[in-house]
Amino acid sequence: MRTLIFSDIHGNLEALNALLKFAQKRHIDRYVCLGDLVGYGASPNETIQKIRMLKPLSLIRGNHDKAVTNQDSIETFNPIAAAAIHWTQARILKKNLEFLTHLPEGPLTVDNEFTICHGAPFDEDYYIFGEFDAAEAFDYLDLPLGFFGHTHFPFIYTKREGQVEGQFLEGPINEIKLEKGVSYFINPGSVGQPRDRNSRAAFAVYDRDLHSIRFHRIEYDIAEAQKKILKAELPSALAERLSLGI
Ligand SMILES: [Fe+2]
């Protein structure tokens, strides 16, 4: 049983299409999405429609999904992020807005196997940055495996005999074997707006039978995503950052 786990697509259809092409060529049984379908990118409607067609086993909301649906204020958003929210609100189709509005809040338990949240299990908007944050998150997780998004950094936190350790994931493919007695809290990275100075789309595949997780980075048509952002008159910084991975 292979589950593709992805997060933070942010209206980047080109990055999502690359992920789907990757998945078609492999054996993927189910999809789990950790939120932030929209915000920043120029294709919110197409992104939502594609994700709906995937019929993910579980899908939770992110802070940008909440902001677009007016379920949260944009006070904490920087001016560029706020501009993208207003742009998205003006263009999102009613059916897609309704879909976003009804996305559940994390944390959620998936198939009694693992937990998912957008930011942290104790607060969906909290950014897990560092072992101190991760240690608190582990206290809220009942299962030994959890996934989170929000920071746009692919990262693994492990808890072994009470000791929490973090590991940043570099390289095109990384794989870990899940060990008994060890807990894992994992960020698969961002599909549509990586921020770790690596412009390639990030996601992970969890293989339940092999007790393994593979982390992937794949190329996508960045130039096309940038062209759409500029044509849409979204802030040009949103286009620039895609090729820099920031
Ligand atoms: Fe995000």
Image: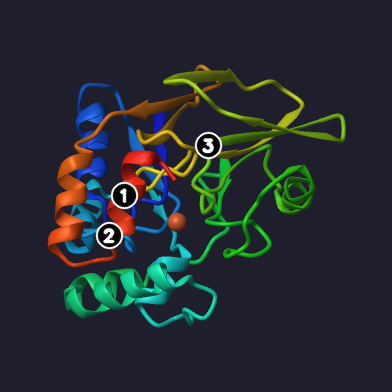
Mark positioned earlier in the residue sequence (2 or 3): 3
The residues bearing labels 2 and 3 have C-alpha atoms spaced at a distance of 25 Å
Question: Circle 1 is placed at which residue position?
Answer: 240
Query: Mark 2: which secondary structure?
Result: helix
* Label 1–label 2 contact, CB within 8 A: yes
In the rendered image of this protein, does residue 37 appear above or below residue 191?
A: below
Question: Circle 2 is placed at which residue position?
Answer: 236
User: Percent x, y for residue 177?
Assistant: 60, 18
In the rendered image of this protein, does residue 157 appear above or below residue 138?
A: above
Mark positioned earlier in the residue sequence (1 or 3): 3
**Residue type highlighted by circle 1:** Glu
Judge left or right: residue 123 versus residue 148.
right
Looking at the rendered image, the quarter that the N terminus falls into is top left
User: Percent x, y for residue 204?
Assistant: 44, 32
The residues bearing labels 1 and 2 have C-alpha atoms spaced at a distance of 6 Å
| Structural crowding at the residue carrying mark 1, measured as other residues with C-alpha within 10 Å and reported as few (<14), some (14–19) or many (≥20) | some
Residue shown at 79% from the left, 46% from the top = 135
Judge left or right: residue 199 versus residue 209.
left
Residue shown at 26% from the left, 72% from the top = 88
Judge left or right: residue 81 versus residue 109.
left
The residues bearing labels 1 and 3 have C-alpha atoms spaced at a distance of 21 Å
Question: Circle 3 is placed at which residue position?
Answer: 154
Q: Is residue 28 visible?
A: yes
Query: Mark 3: which secondary structure?
Result: loop
Which is closer to the viewer, label 1 or label 3?
A: 1
Looking at the rendered image, the quarter that the C terminus falls into is top left
**Residue type highlighted by circle 2:** Ser
Q: Is residue 56 visible?
A: no
| Structural crowding at the residue carrying mark 2, measured as other residues with C-alpha within 10 Å and reported as few (<14), some (14–19) or many (≥20) | some
